[in-house]
Amino acid sequence: MTAKPQILVIDDEQQIQRALRTILGQQNYQINVAGSGEEGLALAAATLPDVIVLDLGLPDMNGVEVCHQLRSWTDIPVIVLSAHDSEQDKVAALDAGADDYLTKPCGVDELLARIRVALRHHSRIKGNKSTEVHVGNLTIDLANYLVTRNGEVVKLTATEFSLLAYLAGNAGRVLTHRAILNHVWGASETSQMEYLRVYIRQLRQKLEEDPHNPQIIMTESGVGYRFIV
């Protein structure tokens, strides 16, 4: 029998705790709840959950610090679920290592969809991750630096492939502008937003069915980009 996926909720609001216990329990998830950052970190280490749902406004520490501490030892996906909705808060959490960010109140279906994406991401981390990413008629072979669309090779520059590989290798995650610029161009170029916009536009021209209505490389307004699989 397949074990139930484990979800750790770190949130001090009892109403949210009860709601998530009910919603996630109905989806056959095993739920653990922590009411503080310290308790959440301890439970994460003890239970090794498949996904963590994290609030930023905790009584003992900021959720961003919880993300920093988690990322010092684990790649467990973290979905921030917070009433803080400013772009600055989102970017801080994502730069600290969160995989996704939802603002309270959010729709149940959207939360469940994000959890499913996070579970797929975690499954790839735990398993022997394939070096190929498939999206519709697009195949990205990360090991052999090869991209094909409808079976035909798509010619990419080295920088275009480096950017695509980073996005595809983190499929489902929201990657901030700073994180992408740092990975592809280096720490000295993290303010060069125009680099990123130009190369994203070029990738969409080569990969999307309709570059003006992208379905693969999605913009997270004011925050970054997400690669959809």
Image (spheres, rainbow, N blue to C red):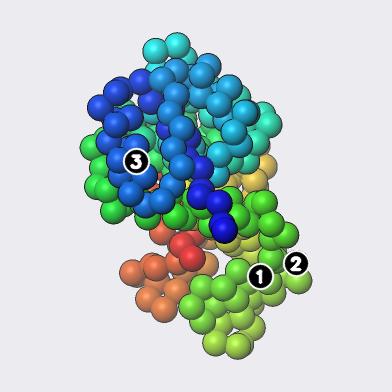
Tell us which disc is closer to us: 3 or 2.
3
> In the image as oriented, which residue stretches furthest toward the right?
144
Q: Secondary structure at mark 1?
A: strand
Cβ–Cβ under 8 Å for marks 1 and 3: no
Viewer-closest of 62 and 181? 62
Task: Write down the residue under mark 1.
Answer: 132
Few, some or many residues within 10 Å of mark 1 (<14, 14–19, 20+):
some
Q: Residue at 43% across / 47% down in the picture?
A: 29
Mark 3 or 2, nearer chain start: 3
Q: Secondary structure at mark 2?
A: loop
Viewer-closest of 95 and 156? 95
Task: Write down the residue under mark 3.
Answer: 102
Quarter of image, res 218: bottom left
Cβ–Cβ under 8 Å for marks 1 and 2: yes
Q: Amino acid at mark 3?
A: Leu
Rounded to the nearest whole Å, what is the CA distance between mark 1 and mark 3?
A: 29 Å
Q: Amino acid at mark 2?
A: Ala
Q: Residue at 45% across / 11% down in the picture?
A: 60
Using the rendered image of the protein, determine whether residue 168 is visible from the camera's viewpoint.
yes
Q: Position of residue 78 (x, y in %)?
A: 50, 39
Task: Write down the residue under mark 2.
Answer: 143
Q: Position of residue 157 (x, y in %)?
A: 66, 68
Q: Residue at 63% across / 75% down in the picture?
A: 147
Q: Amino acid at mark 1?
A: Glu
Q: Secondary structure at mark 3?
A: strand
Using the rendered image of the protein, determine whether residue 86 is visible from the camera's viewpoint.
no
> In the image as oriented, which residue stretches furthest toward the top?
60
Q: Position of residue 88 (x, y in %)?
A: 39, 30
From the viewer's perspective, tell me whether residue 222 is left or right of residue 128.
left
From the viewer's perspective, tell me whether residue 192 is left or right of residue 114.
right
Q: Position of residue 22 (x, y in %)?
A: 30, 40
